[in-house]
Image (tube, rainbow, N blue to C red):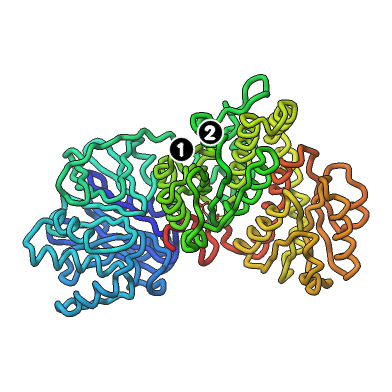
């Protein structure tokens, strides 16, 4: 969470910074700020509570000149969102400005020590100690900004990506990273800096991803210098070429990124599948798995760690892997796993599942498993992000940048990769027949077209949403492969409409939750034709018998549930293990239209951030 942007070169820095902040707003949007040096000794800092547009409004009649600057969009951790706690933060003398993404764990100790040295703090943030510490070191050691940053990084404990400027030197930005992402874009006589590549892509496709412990000295018209944490050795710079396009970062005519991303799924899943199923449809090819064949053949257990929507995809992955590979799978919330002193045995495989590849808890969980001897495999979307760089191997879901805070196309991409992985491992182990692999692989290829068919019902779902917009509570019920779908459907509704919703295994409802059902509490029931269809039908009867309204997601042509439920949405028939890929679509659309009807900020719901890089 929190997004950082920096620019140094010939352009007006403000324009690059503001545009960059807009691109990074998905990381946090409760306040934002910019700092520009207009000439040596002149540092302008503007900050504003609220979204980046509020900052733009605030700065509209101010001096926004200068070709060097840093900027920040915040998701509050320490101190409420207000103008003072917003970044950039400034040192006591007003000389140094700094933006920070992450959390400083020992900030109270540092603050105390610096206070005793006469430093006054104006904000409630952990970040302010870093900028004061840098000034303290510069003053006491009579050293350069770079040397002071290097020394400060040795004294702070926690996660950080920082960018720092000194108003006396408009020709330099110093940046450092530890556990929070930082990317440097290399232009012609100019450099860009950001938490991810999205603010950079419109200027250059050449980037350098900083590694943990590295410090960069960025000066226009000079070679980029990256040092290790001891500020001694100059590290070798690895330039990566970005494969992203600007169109992927725009709404493309849709009112919201979320709707665009829902409608994109036929194409994103085609991209996700592309080249991964052989032309004869008989085999799956995932190089990260094939290269580590013996690990997957010999493991006794797979642990999947994830958060949020990715955790729901992981639950579907468990079903898939257990069914087709006969390997026990444990799914853990990354945040719980990392503090539970987990049993990790040599030979265990840990899969870190994450859209952003930056979720702090997932990253920490995989580091712990790695230390304890597990083989660590990443399934991520953002190329070059921290998790793929920390894992032994992995594969990308290739669904393109997901900007809407509520995850949609990443969820279906994750489930698709997990399905292909299960088939591949199962085939290597001999726990699934070639016929089954061929059948499911063929069905995977049909998914994009089938999703397109479901999307053509969007108007019907939009109408349905009108009926339920004013419900205060929802129950989502599903079983087997679609129990996680129910959890995900409920989460989608909660996060963007702020309506309370609970996902539940349909059969478990009778053990308590059924008491909640009345005329005012609609149930969304996933009742497709699977191996527990008849039982789910019984669960619908139980809801109806108590006066509950039922929206059912059914297999095309179903007449039994149609006669029972108040409203039905049909999805085409497909191999049972792939049904979550189809049922996800109406659930996403229902949540989307209800949120729009309620006038919610769909792409940037309150209190949330897309990439949670703090604990
Ligand atoms: C945040 C987002 C969720 C996301 C979760 C995990 O909470 O709001 O949409 O599912 O993080 O993110 P990851 O990038 O690790 O999949």
How many neighbours does mark 1 have within 10 angstroms: few (below 14), some (14-19), or many (20 or more)? some
Image location of residue 10, percent across then percent down: 22, 44
Left or right: where does residue 611 sit relative to residue 443? left
Q: Position of residue 3 (x, y in %)?
A: 38, 56
* Relative vertical location of residue 159 with respect to residue 261 in this rendering, above or below: below
Image x and y of residue 266, in percent: 65, 37
The quadrant where residue 280 appears: top right
Residue shown at 51% from the left, 47% from the top: 350
In the picture, the quarter occupied by the C terminus is: bottom left
Viewer-nearest residue: 433 or 499:
433
Q: Is mark 2 within 8 Å of ligand 1?
A: no
Q: Tag 1's secondary structure?
A: strand
- How far apart marks 1 and 2 lie (CA) works out to 8 Å
- In this view, the residue in front, 504 or 494, is 504
Q: Quadrant of residue 122?
A: bottom left
Mark 1 vs 2, N-terminal side: 2
| Circle 1/circle 2 CB separation < 8 Å | yes
Q: Residues within 10 Å of mark 2 (few under 14, many from 20)?
A: some
Q: Which residue matches tag 1?
A: 393
Image label count: 2
Judged left or right of residue 55, residue 429 is right
Q: Which mark is residue 351?
A: none
């Amino acid at each position: 969470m929190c997004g950082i942007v920096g620019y140094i070169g010939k352009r007006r820095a403000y324009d690059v910074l503001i545009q960059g902040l807009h691109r990074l707003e998905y990381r946090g949007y409760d306040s934002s700020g910019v700092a520009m040096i207009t000439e040596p000794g002149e540092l302008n800092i503007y900050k504003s509570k609220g979204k980046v547009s509020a900052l733009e409004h605030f700065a509209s009649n101010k001096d926004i000149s200068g070709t060097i600057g840093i900027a920040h969009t915040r998701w509050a951790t320490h101190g409420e969102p207000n103008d003072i706690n917003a970044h950039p933060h400034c040192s006591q003398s007003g000389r140094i400005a700094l933006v920070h993404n992450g959390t400083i764990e020992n900030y109270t100790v540092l603050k105390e020590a610096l206070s005793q040295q006469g430093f006054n703090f104006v904000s409630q943030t952990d970040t302010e100690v870093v900028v004061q510490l840098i000034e303290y070191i510069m003053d006491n050691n009579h050293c350069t900004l770079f040397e002071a940053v290097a020394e400060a990084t040795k004294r702070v404990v926690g996660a950080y990506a920082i960018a720092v400027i000194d108003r006396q030197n408009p020709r330099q930005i110093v940046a450092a990273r530890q556990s929070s992402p930082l990317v440097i874009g290399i232009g012609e006589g100019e450099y860009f800096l950001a938490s991810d590549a999205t603010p950079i892509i419109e200027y250059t496709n050449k980037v350098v991803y900083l590694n943990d412990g590295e410090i960069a000295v960025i000066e226009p018209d000079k070679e980029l210098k990256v040092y290790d944490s001891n500020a001694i050795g100059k590290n070798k710079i690895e330039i990566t070429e970005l494969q992203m396009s600007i169109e992927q970062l725009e709404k493309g005519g849709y009112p919201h990124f979320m709707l665009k991303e829902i409608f994109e799924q036929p194409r994103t899943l085609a991209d996700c599948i592309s080249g991964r199923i052989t032309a004869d449809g008989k085999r799956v090819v995932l190089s990260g798995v094939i290269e580590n064949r013996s690990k997957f053949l010999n493991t006794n257990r797979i642990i999947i760690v994830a958060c949020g929507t990715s955790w729901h995809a992981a639950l579907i992955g468990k079903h898939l892997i257990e069914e087709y590979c006969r390997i026990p799978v444990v799914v853990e919330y990354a945040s719980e796993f990392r503090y539970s002193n987990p049993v990790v045995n040599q030979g265990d495989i840990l899969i870190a599942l994450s859209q952003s590849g930056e979720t702090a808890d997932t990253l920490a969980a995989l580091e712990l498993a790695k230390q304890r001897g597990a083989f660590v495999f990443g399934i991520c979307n953002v190329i070059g992000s921290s998790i793929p760089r920390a894992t032994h191997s992995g594969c990308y879901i290739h669904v393109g940048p997901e900007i809407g805070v509520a995850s949609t196309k990443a969820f279906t991409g994750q489930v698709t990769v997990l399905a292909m992985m299960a088939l591949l491992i199962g085939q290597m182990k001999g726990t699934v027949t070639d016929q089954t692999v061929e059948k499911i692989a063929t069905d995977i290829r049909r998914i994009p077209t089938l999703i397109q068919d479901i999307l053509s019902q969007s108007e019907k779902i939009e109408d349905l949403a009108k009926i339920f917009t004013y419900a205060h509570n929802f129950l989502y019920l599903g079983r087997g492969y679609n129990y996680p779908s129910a959890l995900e459907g409920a989460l989608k509704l909660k996060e963007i409409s702020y309506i309370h919703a609970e996902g539940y295994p349909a059969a478990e409802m009778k053990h308590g939750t059924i008491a909640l059902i009345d005329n005012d509490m609609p149930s969304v029931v996933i009742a497709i034709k699977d191996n527990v269809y008849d039982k789910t039908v019984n669960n619908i009867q139980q809801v109806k018998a108590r006066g509950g309204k039922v929206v059912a997601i059914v297999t095309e042509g179903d007449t039994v549930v149609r006669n029972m439920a108040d409203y039905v949405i049909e999805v085409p028939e497909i191999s049972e293990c792939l049904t979550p890929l189809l049922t996800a679509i109406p659930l996403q659309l229902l949540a989307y239209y209800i949120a729009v009807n309620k006038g919610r900020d769909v792409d940037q719901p309150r209190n949330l951030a897309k990439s949670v890089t703090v604990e």
